[in-house]
């Protein structure tokens, strides 16, 4: 696992960061006074505002920029929908149980943890660990002494372990079970091997309606609602293709072992795009040229399968050209995701796009890349970008008989040849009686290949055998009197196709947490003060934009404050006033922890000449000007039309006190 | 039931409106290709945008205006929390079953429906119905002939029925059962009396975690998460009172019989405020004077109990003064709700505040008023505003032992007298052995009243009896040797209290639907055209602000269009272009249905002099000016700094064609 650093390149002090986030109420364990429920977190005021700003930026960057059709579908989903989509059967993780204490373990995490512990022990035995990682803090030392003892491994074993870890997401339950046996992996709590992995479905189940006869689930993704509305959305887009729908909403996964914090939770906010595209024409994208030169950091499938995690930087244009990324539309969205994360303030050196391995991909996907962000918990999947092919639309159409296709007028009519079945209804009724309808449907639903085969059989033996589910033993025999099957020419004016779907899917909570780690740093102690925490959010993302600090609570400042607040509100700049009695420095320090980018001090000079000071969070430098100028300046800083350097060049510096 | 009208005073053509809303994809039944699930609806693009704008306005009007602390808590809630809050035992509706066909009926709606049908039959028999209500449309006539035959009732019976209907929300299950028997109310489908009402809990149940041992529910309201975080929120507000938290999120109620449409659904968006206030000092509000003169339309408890539904208009200041509304804080929020609904575009003549009757109030409330909006389905509760007293904080504190109180430093220390218990631990241990701890806790938890009683018993007989759950038969006897109970003086420097909670709670979907009915009207046919639907949303609320219509798809317009769109985007004005080949009039008509307030035409004159036309939706009048002027004008119209009249006075009229 790579080590993560804070914004200034220092190791992240996770304990200090966590305590600050809890104290400032960014988020907090839900139901804590009831002992809490693992995997459930509430957002407090700054977390809520941060989340809203991320969503706002997302909506502008994706939905508005590309005229996407936003929908808001229900979380409650009936069983049949998720049965068809494959989630009832396949949306599961592998779960083991400790035979003695009943611990429930997620199999892949268990394998990963035990192997990582052994590798750490090996490094320690070789005397490498401390030199390599500068593991100086008390916590990590403790971890080492608590875990397996320092045992040196054979060089070959180290390589084997590293190779397993590089492709840990590629194993199924059986394979994970084999790894547990082969390497004798034991639960540290009992020193016993856990039971073989079994599938555990991750959906929360419930029952809809008063008679309890409609089983349902809380959706595990927002995508299905978008697929089911495909035809209505296509109509509301006046039939034009390609187009995208988008949705922002909660989804639910009953994780086997949620992590502490926001990285693996059971209820989370997702933002998902379903871009519907014609599968013919290589899934070109008309704006691909705008992004072709953008360089992405890629970790492809082959590299992982060879047991490596080496990334390479490739312009997305070249990656698509070389076939590394499957098509332009997929590549376009990878680049757009990159730009979005950059805008948010994500550290580009802690972002990589990792391609899924074959076994790892969701049951529907044909190619998939995850945007992963490096945090103190390692590389975390924050955005998935999958080509779901025509899978979902096809299975839902097949199950319901609904038309989830695009019908496109051909510029020139086309003559096609096709196998046609003419059924004699009279003979059908006399021969099959109550089963007549089933046989007729089976004939009508037969594919071109099946028809060709049936026609050949009829031709050769005068009889043909058709599979009909639920009739006799599943097969019925019929002759030429019942159905004529022949190839005919037909002029078609339309082309019908099921669109493919490219799906960028964002886990907002994971992005939010990773962002916090990326913009976190500690200001060195000046003049004997304690080190101070800072969150350097870009102004557009910061929960509050401006902290207003009156130098004292005296009445003389009140009219200035009121006027200032009104001007900030009119300019649409969210601000807060800190009236408390603590020193100005302390008040600013508190707001550095909240990531508030700007501070305004109202002081005695203000009373004299109406001027106020503006402080920038990261540099703590200040300028001074009249209210209107300061408000306009803040607006330019938030909408990125000016930098702090520009402001310092324009407005007089203020050096009253270092804050 | 009152009849509702559209914006121009015409009866609402519900069928036409519904078809338009579905066609334009404001909302649509969820999972329709799977046959749908009653009570679940998806929002399409215009519905989504409308919802987002309502939420945006709500956030500005309430959260930002009053510095509320926004939180986002989980929907998944463990059983214990909702057991304590009373929801597991009491959050239920009364349900009956038809003994023959198994129909499940919500008891109060069943009683209401049958009595209303009988009253309609009576009116018809008296020859009143048609004159009174102008029931000319085919649908209503059908309803009458399908239902009970026209039977005249005694005048006394009519009065009885009307009185029951006026207080229908005041009956419990037993009383509803009595009404069914007394008036022989039968299910029209089978002509049988349904079974007696039983309670049906409205929460969706699920199970959290892989071992299925943590039962949970999907929250029925956002409030509980806010209460459980009370102490953290108070701290993050630096201990200052009063303050409010607020939350916007989905809640779930497993309705027995959901209505078609958005008015009674099983999954819905709520916006809730929990305003925490000191119960002493009559719950004054420091901004009450700002709203005291606002006149509200009130329907109080007494009027309803007397079988009437007559409203009266009262300034909220007077209503509080007269004790009609319990306190200033409750009154303040009623007025703020009124102002919010007005801003949204709600028709003031279709808004009333109805006070809850005693039996109707939620189990926690001490006073409650609903903002009801008149729609074609009658008066619909859209906002509840309840005084929940200290109920929730008290029960959660009692159950968990957490401190959910405010500790306030007294300006002057106070000497108080209180009953104190001194327990002799040695005697306690010897007497009660393993139960000692339980007895000690019971003594420590005893109230002042209980202590006074115990002291008196000890004084009189040397012995006292204490209730201790789970010990012996629930009662233990002890003597003076075990505990000394006496009254003592103590100087206190702090005051501790459990805040009361005023809760304004908004059903966003109901408000959204009612608003649509209130701004809906049909433009008269001009020149033989069909009547056209219009939704006159205020500009700030409209899903899209501007429709841009190029007069043709010719290349010559493209540079103008691009420039215009970029200027609109820079000004933050959401717009859409309609490139289709239909006439400009048809394109505008389509957008009148979406409620788009402004239209811009780019025509051949634009190519010559750069001028464009601006059309106003309701008047269909147009002005013409250059792009910058038009964009600035739209901005002023959206932020309400100009009216269309102002614009017509300033810019040259354009009369090219009536659109």
Image (cartoon, coloured by chain):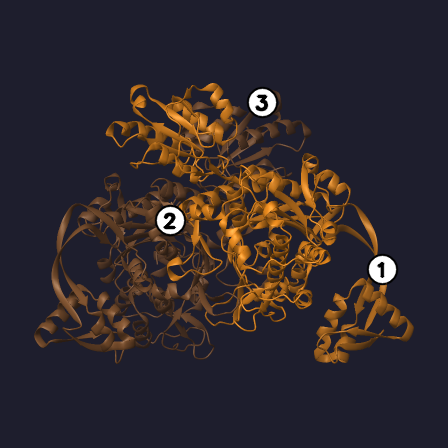
Chain colours: A orange, B brown
In terms of secondary structure, where does tag 3 sit? loop
Q: Nearer the viewer, residue B334 or A585?
A: A585
Q: Position of residue B539 (x, y in %)?
A: 45, 37
Neighbour class for label 2 at 10 Å: few (<14), some, many (≥20)?
many
Chain of the residue on which disc 3 is drawn: B
Same-chain check, marks 3 and 1: no
In terms of secondary structure, where does tag 1 sit? strand
Chain of the residue on which disc 1 is drawn: A
Lateral position of residue A325 relative to residue A88, left or right: right
* First-in-chain label (2 vs 3): 2
Residue depicted at 49% across the width and 19% down the height:
A649
Residue depicted at 62% across the width and 43% down the height:
A351
Lateral position of residue B72 relative to residue B338, left or right: right
Q: Which residue is mark 3?
A: B610
Report, in whole angstroms, how far the alpha carbon at label 1 lies from the one at label 2.
Answer: 67 Å
Could you tell me if residue B370 is visible in this image? yes
Which quarter of the figure has residue B254? bottom left
Could you tell me if residue B43 is visible in this image? no
Where B198 falls versus A71 (above or below)?
below
Q: Which residue is mark 2?
A: B246
Q: Which residue is mark 1?
A: A488
Where A431 falls versus B534 (above or below)?
below
Report, in whole angstroms, how far the alpha carbon at label 2 lies from the one at label 3.
Answer: 48 Å
């Amino acid at each position: 696992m790579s080590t993560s650093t804070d914004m200034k390149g220092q190791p992240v002090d996770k304990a200090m960061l966590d305590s600050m986030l809890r104290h400032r109420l960014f988020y907090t364990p839900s139901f804590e006074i009831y002992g809490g429920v693992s995997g459930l977190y509430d957002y407090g005021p700054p977390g809520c505002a941060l989340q809203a700003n991320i969503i706002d930026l997302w909506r502008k960057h994706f939905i508005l920029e590309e005229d996407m059709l936003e929908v808001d579908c229900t979380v409650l989903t009936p069983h049949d929908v998720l049965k068809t989509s494959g989630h009832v059967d396949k949306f599961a993780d592998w779960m083991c149980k400790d035979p003695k204490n009943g611990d429930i373990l997620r199999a892949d995490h268990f394998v990963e943890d035990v192997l990582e512990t052994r590798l750490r022990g090996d490094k320690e035995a070789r005397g490498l660990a401390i030199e390599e990682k500068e593991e100086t803090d008390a916590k990590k030392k403790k971890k080492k002494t608590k875990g397996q003892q320092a045992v040196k491994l054979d060089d070959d074993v180290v390589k084997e372990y590293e190779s397993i870890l590089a492709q840990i997401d590629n194993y199924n339950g059986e394979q994970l079970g084999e790894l547990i046996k082969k390497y004798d992996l034991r639960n540290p709590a009992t020193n016993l091997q856990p039971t073989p992995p079994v599938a555990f479905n991750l959906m929360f189940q419930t029952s809809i309606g008063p008679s309890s006869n409609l089983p349902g689930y809380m959706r595990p993704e927002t995508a299905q609602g978008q697929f089911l509305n495909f035809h209505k959305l296509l109509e509301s887009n006046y039939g034009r293709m390609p187009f995208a729908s988008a949705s922002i909403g909660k989804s639910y996964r009953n994780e086997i072992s949620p992590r502490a914090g926001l990285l693996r939770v059971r209820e989370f906010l997702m933002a998902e795009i379903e871009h519907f595209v014609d599968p013919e024409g290589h899934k070109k994208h008309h704006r691909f040229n705008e992004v072709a030169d953008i360089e992405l950091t890629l970790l492809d499938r082959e590299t992982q399968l060879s047991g490596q995690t080496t990334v390479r930087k490739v312009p997305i244009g070249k990656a698509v050209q070389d076939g590394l990324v499957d098509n332009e539309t997929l590549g376009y969205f990878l680049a757009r995701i990159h730009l979005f994360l950059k805008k948010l303030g994500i550290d580009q050196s802690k972002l990589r796009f990792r391609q899924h391995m074959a076994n790892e991909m969701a049951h529907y996907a044909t190619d998939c890349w995850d945007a992963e962000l490096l945090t103190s918990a390692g590389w975390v999947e924050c955005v998935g970008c999958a080509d779901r092919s025509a899978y979902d639309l096809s299975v839902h159409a097949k199950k319901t008989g609904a038309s989830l296709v695009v019908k496109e007028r051909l510029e020139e009519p086309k003559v096609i040849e096709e196998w046609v079945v003419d059924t004699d209804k009279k003979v059908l009724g006399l021969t099959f009686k109550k089963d007549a309808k089933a046989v007729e449907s089976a004939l009508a639903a037969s594919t071109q290949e099946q028809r060709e085969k049936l026609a050949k059989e009829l031709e050769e033996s005068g009889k043909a055998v058709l599979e009909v589910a639920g009739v006799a033993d599943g097969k019925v025999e019929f002759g030429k009197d019942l159905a004529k099957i022949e190839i005919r020419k037909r002029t078609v004016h339309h082309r019908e196709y099921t669109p493919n779907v490219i799906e960028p899917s964002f886990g907002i909570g994971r992005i939010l947490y990773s962002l916090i780690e990326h913009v976190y740093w500690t200001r060195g102690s000046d003049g004997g003060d304690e080190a101070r925490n800072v969150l350097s959010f870009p102004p557009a993302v910061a929960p509050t934009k401006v902290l207003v600090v009156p130098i004292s609570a005296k009445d003389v400042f009140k009219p200035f404050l009121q006027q200032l607040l009104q001007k900030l509100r009119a300019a649409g700049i969210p601000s807060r006033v800190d009236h408390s009695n603590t020193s100005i420095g302390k008040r600013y320090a508190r707001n550095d922890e909240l990531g508030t980018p700007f501070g305004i001090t109202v002081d005695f000079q203000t009373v004299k000449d109406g001027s106020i000071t503006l402080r920038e969070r990261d540099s703590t430098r200040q300028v001074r000007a009249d209210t209107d100028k300061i408000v306009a300046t803040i607006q330019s800083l938030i909408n990125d039309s000016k930098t702090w350097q520009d402001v310092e060049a324009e407005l007089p510096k203020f050096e009253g006190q270092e804050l």
